[in-house]
Amino acid sequence: MTDAARRDRILGYLEDLVAFPTAYPPGHSTDICAYLAEKLEARGYETGVHANVPGMDNVVARLGSGKPSLVFNVHIDTVDAGDPALWSSPPHEATVRGDSVFGLGAANCKGSGAVQLWLAEEIARRGGPALGEVVFTYVTDEESLGPNGMAFLRDQGIVRPDMLLLGAPTDNAMVVSERGVLWVEVTTTGKAAHAGQPEDGDNAILRMLRVLSRCDAEMGKRLADRRRGGMHSTINVGTLSGGRNANVVPSECRAVIDRRLLPEETVDEAFEELDAILRDGDEPVGSVTVERLRGTNGFEGDLDGEMLTALRQSIEAVTGAPAAIGGAIGVSDGRYFADDRLEIVNFGPGVGSEGHAIDESVTFESLDTSARVLERLVGDLLGFRRE
């Protein structure tokens, strides 16, 4: 395939994908998954649409059989576009300006979606993998860190990768290490009373402020030295809500805390630590409750592994430069496989800072480089039946 034909094909797929509204909330993906399933099935893939809850569909398409199972992944949900008037062009139209394509999800992660759809087509055109199977997964519920996308496919055994490549916007660098994530909800309770006589009540918001202030001071000391390279362990209070009206002493307050963990930290240990700190105070027994909402461990890849070695060599062959090792601020769906003893890497076109931004964009060069690297990777790892 010529460079121009590859570029036109990828651009056409990206235009189609951006046109589907898949923002979370609600993260509905029925229409875009129907489109993807039709494309993949037409190219000979064994294709299924799987949903844990109605409206949140996921596509799984496989070609070949046996091991190794090389699984590609893209999340097709996006954040909300916000005010469309702030965009230079309609968010749900892939607009070409200069050497870039603009549109909601262009970088995170529909650009990777278009590249991987082209890759699936190219693998099929060349007869499929000579060894093992190749699997393409397009999932929702990533933006909410939810259980209805890649987590569902893993828990149901629908995908069992030996090697997992997630199409994150890494600017075609290899992200092989990722922090774990833990979300915890804290609830404080008190006693309602009239604001004109607050001494008759017990203010749950003030209790929460005391609890969070103590937690911030203690965790700040503990996390100061939990660093490794560019990664560090963090804590953030993300939401705080409570009270019914300004003239009522609030009887309940809730907060949600986000903890990011180094790969060597586990979510179980992190929850126990945080739970102990939040409860360690002079508040009345039963007035502070702590609930673990969700959490997954981080992972750290072996750069000498089969897939990572092949990917590094593919990057260097295509770009003529050493493969870059990038870092991740957020977390990917790879975290659901962190304890499964497989190779995991995030790799794809686009810059991470473009995701979630007004006028989100991805460059043609980044898309094309990603496509050529992945094509070479599949050839090196699995081979093609027809060369």
Image (cartoon, grey):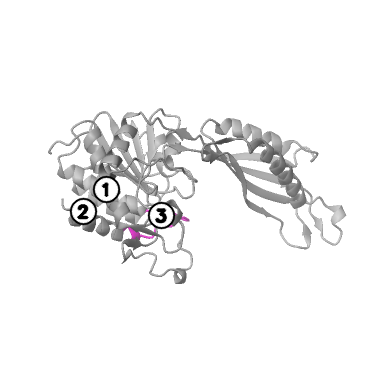
Q: In this view, does 189 lie above or below 89?
A: above
Residue at (79, 51) in percent of width and height? 203
Write the residue at 81% across / 56% down. Answer: 193
Element carrying mark 3: loop
Percent position (x, y) of residue 221?
69, 38
The furthest residue to the left = 386
Could you tell me which secondary element the residue under label 1 belongs to? helix
Number of the front mark, 1 or 3: 1
The residue that disc 1 covers is 371
Q: Is mark 2 on a helix, strand or loop?
A: helix
Q: Which residue is drawn at 26% across and 38% down?
A: 377
Residue 5 vs 182, above or below: the answer is: below
Please check the rendered image and state whether residue 20 is part of the magenta-colored stretch, yes or no.
yes
Distance CA(mark 1)–CA(mark 3) = 27 Å
**Residue to which mark 3 is pinned:** 28
Task: Give the residue pinned by disc 2.
Answer: 6
What amino acid does circle 1 point to? Ala
